[in-house]
Every structure is written in C-alpha cells, then in structure tokens.
Image: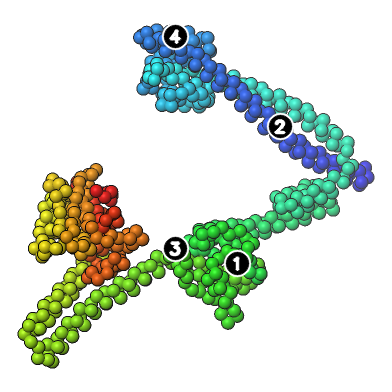
C-alpha cells in the first residue's frame, strides 16, 4: 500500500470518529427533545387521571360525611373506589388526620401526603408528583371535601408512576438501538467519502468566523499531525489565548462597573471632545436626571459644575468646589485630568454635602445668635455701670437703672439656663423621672404663675376645656417647664383682652393637649422652622425673646417619649403636645 493510501486510510478513520461524535450529539439532542417531552406528557396524563378521580370521588365522600358515615363505611368506600381507579385512596379530616385508607394496615407516613394539608389550607384542589420517603414516585391529587363554606375533609388519590417510568425506559432502549444502527450506516457512508479532505479546511474556516463573531470557545478537530492538523492546533491555541485575554478584559470591566454602581459618590467620565462617556447611577441620582452617553457635558450637569470642569488647565489639572443648588441641595464636585486612560481624558466626582452644609450653617447661626444675645445685655449692663460709677445720678434714676440692670441680668440668667438645658439634652445628661402626672393640675399651676403678673388688659389663660382626669406618664417638673414655655410664647404673641385656650383629650393610649392663642399666627412656610434654635419668624416683631424656648419644649417632649407639633389656625397659632398615657412611645396626634 502506497504512502498516499495510508494517509487516506488514516484520514478516513479520523473523519469517521469525528462524525461519530457529531452523530452522538445529534442523537443526544433528539433524545433530549423526545424523551423529556414524552415523560412530561405521560406525567401530565397521570396527574389528570388522579385529579379527575379525586374530584369524582369527593362528591361521594361529601354525601357520606353529611350522613354521618362511620369510619368502617369510609374504609369500604375507599377500597371500592381504589379498585375502580387502580390507585390508593385516603380520606382525611379538616385537620389533616387520616380517617379512611384503601390500603388500611399498610405503611402510612403523614409527611408523604403534605399535599392534603396544602389543599385544605388553600381550599382548592392540588395535583402533583410526589417523591415518597422510600424513594418511590407517585402522582397525587388532593381535593377538599366542602359543605358550603366549611371544609369537612380532603380526599387524596395516588397512583404509582412506575408505569410512566417503564414506558420512558422502553422508548430510551428503542432510541438507543435505532441510534446504534444509524451510527453504523453513517460510519460506512463517511468512510466512502473520506477523500473530501476539504471539509477539514472548511471546518477551520468556520471556526475562524465564529471567533471573529466573539465565540472564543470554538475548537476545531486537530486530527493527525499533518499540515492541516498543525494548522488546526495553532488555530485552537490562538482562540484560547484570545478568549482568555477578552475574558480578563470583560472581568475588569465588570469589576469597574460594579465598583461604580456601588459608589455613593457620583462619577462622570469625559472624553477629549467634552462628551460624557460613562456615568454611574449615583451621578444620575445626585443630579436628578438620566444621563445617556455619549452626551455633551453641558447638557448633563449644572452650569456651576460645567464651569468648574471648564476652568481646568495644565497649571490647574484638578479643581474642586461646593455648590448650593435648587431645593437647598449642596454638592461638592472635584474635577481632574486623567493620564494614559485611552478614551477618558477627565473625571468629575460629585458628593452630596447638603447635610454637612446645613450643619455648618446651623453651627455658625447658633454661635452668631448666642453671641448677639449675650452681647446686648452685657453692653447694656456695662453702660449703666459706667453711668452709675462716673456721674452723680439721682436716686430715682439710679433705681430705674438698677431695675433695668436686674432685667438684663435675669435675661442673661434665662439665656444661660436655656443654653445649659440644650447642652444637657444634646449630651444626654438630662434625665427624666416618669410618674403618672395630672395634666390639668400642672397646666393650672403654671397658669397661676402668669396670672399673678397680669394686668386687666393682658391676655388670659382659659383651661376650662382641659379635662381633669387626663394623666400622662411623664416628668412633672419637665412637663411644667414645657407648659410654661408654650404659655409664655402664646401670651407674648396675643393681642390685649384676648384668650389663650388650653384644651385636651385622651386618644389611643396617649394624652394630647393643645395651647392656642388669637395672635398673628405662623406663616405656613415657617412652620417647619419654629423649633429651630434661635429662629424667630417675621411675626416676632418687637416681642422680646431668644428663640430657644420652643426648641427646648420640642426636646423636652421627645425626652418624655412624646412629641409636639405647630399649626397655623384660622386665628392665631396652636401647639399640640402628645405624651404617653401608659409609658410607651407614641406618635404625634392630630390637633384637638
């Protein structure tokens, strides 16, 4: 035999093996398409049969239950129907307990029939294939036996799946025999056409096209170590390396995307043309708009951030600033150039600093207002002392000066007490001693303090609508301090000859009382700020005060597991306090 014939014979064998593998794959595909479908159809038929039997027999069991049939009769009934259906039939009561069994005396495991309890719970028929604890497989149907709206029991019909398994096994054997015969015939045909060596070349060509489309797992058969085999081996190695390289790139991209998506800071990448080519979800959330790359940066970010990015230069490759935008949103933006980053030439990182800006503003306002409140009485006292020290002052004027100085000292003392209370609340050093406290008793006591200082034209405090039986779980002294602040605030802003009313009631485990006056009221836009420290609204006018009272009242209410809310009524303002009546935390209630 010549060398050429040996080569052709070797090629024929190898092609036969290749086509054998292909044939096996085809048979496997046919098997996966036919056998599971057949098994599924047979299983569905079996489930349909047991479901039909269960529904049919449930009517007889309902009639038997309504007639008060004995367990012996029910056993006989299950045996009769079991012979007709060639199945095991069980009847259980509404609690899932076995009442009758067509195979009475045989093994019964309640865990195998959990479908019955599910049918009772859902009040509807259930059919399924169940694997028993002994490894056998059964088709089961459970149908609730109901009399009107009352479920009296459930009937369970179960048939073995062994018949289905036998049919599937037979089909499998037939497929295997047919595949074997077909494979032999195919090998003979392949051997006769083995001279078509061009198929190997076309296989390599097809593999190259698949790799070009991104399928780097493509492999072509190497065969022998002839020229075509060496070419195929080199081709496979190239595909593996390309696949590994692109897989690493894909992993890095996914990691980068995952990091960007998880960042709370917004990240925006810009190319050399000023187009946004990447933006993470945080950037869209902070800017309040959807960003669809590629888009011009000026259309994606506020003008302030765009100007910050545009101001970068070789001398200033990194710029950062904080901007307060609409809705009092504050954003800190940092823009910087990137080097050796291919498409990306610059990066903008955005962070929400609204809370930090608000806290800093509150800190500055607090210090400024506290300094102002301290400075005014101190300067006044210093001026009076200089006059009293350096000049001869009449006795009457001296008494007036001393009275005014006493007022300023009282003002300083009150401010110091308020600041001390706030400081103790902030540090958690202020404690409360909760007891059962009568609210009307506390309010009347505080009202008498103000009554002693009033003249005929001053506003009056009316507590007639405050029930005497109201009792809250709170600190008596702190509650009196809270009421004193609210009454003082209401009286200051009430016109002459008007009335400040205090009313209350019990509501859902809480005590609610409201202090309302007939003053100028509170503008709606100021309602959410009345409890801020040192805040005094436009309606304050010439009314003296530090702006700390309502802040302390708010903190006292929260310290006692309560709450306080402000509302603008038709005439005047109302402050509603909610305190627990049983020692548990409560939510703010509606104004009385």
Say whether residue 166 is visible: yes
Q: Earlier in the sequence, mark 4 or mark 2?
A: 2
Binning the other alpha carbons within 10 Å of mark 4 as few (below 14), some (14 to 19) or many (20 upward) gives many
How dense is the environment of label 3, judged by Cα within 10 Å: few (below 14), some, or many (20 and up)? few
The residue drawn where x is 57% and y is 77% is 311
- Could you tell which of marks 1 and 3 lies nearer the N-terminus? 1
Q: Considering the numbered disc 4 on the image, is that residue within a helix, a strand or a loop?
A: helix
Answer with mark 2 or mark 3, whichever residue precedes in sequence: 2
**Residue receiving disc 2:** 30
* Alpha-carbon span between mark 4 and mark 2: 46 Å
In-front residue for pair 274/8? 274
The numbered mark at residue 327 is 3
Q: x, y (%) of residue 17?
A: 78, 39
Circle 4 or circle 2, nearest the eye = 4
CB-based contact (under 8 Å), mark 2 and mark 3: no
x 73%, y 26%: residue: 177
Q: Tell which tag, 1 or 2, sits nearer the viewer.
A: 1
Q: Residue beneath label 4, please?
A: 77
Alpha-carbon distance for marks 2 and 3? 65 Å
Residue matched to label 1 = 297
- The first of marks 1 and 2 along the sequence is 2
Q: Is residue 75 visible?
A: no
- Whether pointer 4 and pointer 2 mark residues with C-beta atoms closer than 8 Å, the reply is no
């Amino acid at each position: 035999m010549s060398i050429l014939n040996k080569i052709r014979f070797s090629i024929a064998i190898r092609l036969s093996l290749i086509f054998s593998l292909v044939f096996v794959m085809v048979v496997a595909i046919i098997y996966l398409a036919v056998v599971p479908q057949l098994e599924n159809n047979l299983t569905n038929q079996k489930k349909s049969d047991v479901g039909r039997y269960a529904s049919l027999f449930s009517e007889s069991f309902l009639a038997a239950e309504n007639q008060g049939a004995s367990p012996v009769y029910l056993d006989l009934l299950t045996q009769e129907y079991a012979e007709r259906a060639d199945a095991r039939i069980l009847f259980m009561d509404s609690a899932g307990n076995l009442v009758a069994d067509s195979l009475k005396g045989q093994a019964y495991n309640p865990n195998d029939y959990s479908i019955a309890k599910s049918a009772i719970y859902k009040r509807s028929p259930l059919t399924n294939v169940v694997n028993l604890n002994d490894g056998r497989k059964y088709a089961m149907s459970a149908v609730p036996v109901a009399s009107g709206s009352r479920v009296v029991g459930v009937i369970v019909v179960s048939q073995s799946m062994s018949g289905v398994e036998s049919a599937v096994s037979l089909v499998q054997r037939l497929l295997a025999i047919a595949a074997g015969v077909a494979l032999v015939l195919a090998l003979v045909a392949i051997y006769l056409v083995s001279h078509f060596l061009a198929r190997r070349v076309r296989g390599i060509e097809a593999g190259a096209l698949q790799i070009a489309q991104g399928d780097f797992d493509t492999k072509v058969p190497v065969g022998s170590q002839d020229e075509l085999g060496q070419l195929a081996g080199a081709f496979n190695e190239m595909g593996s390396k390309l696949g590994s390289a692109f897989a690493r790139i894909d992993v890095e991209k996914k990691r980068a995307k995952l990091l960007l998506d998880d960042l709370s800071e917004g990240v925006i990448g810009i190319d050399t043309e000023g187009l946004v080519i990447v933006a993470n979800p945080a950037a869209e959330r902070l800017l309040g708009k959807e960003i669809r790359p590629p888009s011009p940066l000026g259309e994606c970010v506020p003008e302030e951030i765009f100007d910050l990015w545009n101001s970068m230069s070789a001398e200033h490759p990194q710029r950062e600033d904080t901007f307060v935008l609409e809705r009092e949103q504050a954003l800190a933006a940092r823009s910087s150039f990137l080097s050796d980053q291919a498409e990306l030439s610059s990066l903008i990182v955005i962070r929400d600093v609204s809370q930090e800006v608000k806290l800093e503003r509150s800190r500055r306002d607090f210090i400024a207002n506290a300094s102002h409140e301290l400075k005014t009485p101190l300067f006044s006292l210093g001026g009076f002392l200089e006059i009293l020290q350096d000049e001869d002052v009449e006795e009457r004027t001296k008494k007036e000066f001393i009275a005014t100085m006493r007022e300023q000292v009282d003002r300083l003392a009150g401010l110091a007490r308020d600041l001390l209370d706030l400081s103790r609340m902030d540090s958690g050093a202020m404690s409360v001693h909760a007891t059962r406290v009568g609210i009307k008793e506390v309010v009347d006591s505080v009202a008498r303090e103000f009554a002693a200082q009033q003249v005929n034209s001053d506003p009056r405090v009316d507590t007639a609508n405050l029930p005497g039986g109201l009792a809250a779980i709170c600190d008596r002294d702190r509650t009196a301090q809270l009421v004193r602040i609210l009454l003082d605030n209401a009286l200051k802003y009430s016109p002459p000859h008007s009335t400040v009313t205090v009313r209350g009631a019990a509501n859902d485990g809480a005590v609610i009382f409201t202090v309302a006056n007939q003053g100028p009221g509170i503008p709606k836009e100021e309602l959410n700020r009345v409890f801020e420290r040192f805040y005094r609204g436009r309606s304050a006018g010439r009314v003296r005060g530090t702006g700390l009272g309502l802040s302390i009242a708010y903190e006292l209410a929260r310290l006692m597991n309560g709450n306080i809310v402000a509302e603008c009524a038709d005439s005047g303002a109302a402050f509603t306090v909610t305190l627990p009546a049983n020692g548990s935390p409560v939510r703010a209630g509606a104004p009385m």
